[in-house]
Image: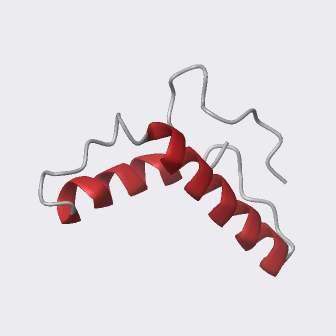
């Protein structure tokens, strides 16, 4: 399961975070700033990754989701 600290202190985003940011930009109508939502987005993507790993029994590669 995900053992990385919450918040991405290094500032780098994994592919899942980048995908969520792209969806917010596209479907948010310009009203959502992904930079301001970084903390909440990190929690959402970490939870989704954990649920995927629990359901499938397979680990998500660190390249895709830290």
The image shows a total of numbered marks equal to: 0
Q: Residue lying furthest left in this view? A: 29
* Residue shown at 40% from the left, 42% from the top: 37
* Residue shown at 52% from the left, 39% from the top: 39
Q: Quadrant of the N terminus?
A: bottom right
Q: Could you say where residue 40 lies in the image, as x and y percent from the top left? A: 51, 47
**How is the model colour-coded?**
secondary structure
Q: Could you say where residue 42 lies in the image, as x and y percent from the top left? A: 56, 45
Q: Is residue 14 visible?
A: no
Q: Could you say where residue 45 lies in the image, as x and y percent from the top left? A: 58, 56
Which of the 4 image quadrants contains residue 29? bottom left
* Residue shown at 73% from the left, 71% from the top: 51
Compare residues 60 and 30 and report the one nearer the observer: 30
Q: Residue lying furthest bottom in this view? A: 55
Q: Is residue 59 left or right of residue 17?
A: right
* Residue shown at 29% from the left, 57% from the top: 24
Q: Is residue 25 visible?
A: yes
Q: Residue lying furthest top in this view? A: 10
Q: Is residue 62 left or right of residue 23?
A: right
Which of the 4 image quadrants contains residue 19? bottom left
Compare residues 31 and 47 and report the one nearer the observer: 31
The relative height of residue 63 versus residue 57 in the rendered view (above or below) is above
The relative height of residue 10 versus residue 15 in the rendered view (above or below) is above
């Amino acid at each position: 399961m995900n053992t990385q600290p919450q918040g991405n202190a290094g500032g780098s985003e994994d592919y899942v975070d980048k995908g969520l940011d792209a969806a917010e930009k596209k479907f948010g109508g310009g009203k959502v700033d992904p930079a301001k939502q970084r903390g909440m987005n990190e929690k959402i993507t970490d939870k989704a990754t954990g649920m995927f790993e629990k359901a499938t029994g397979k680990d998500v590669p660190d390249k895709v989701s830290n």
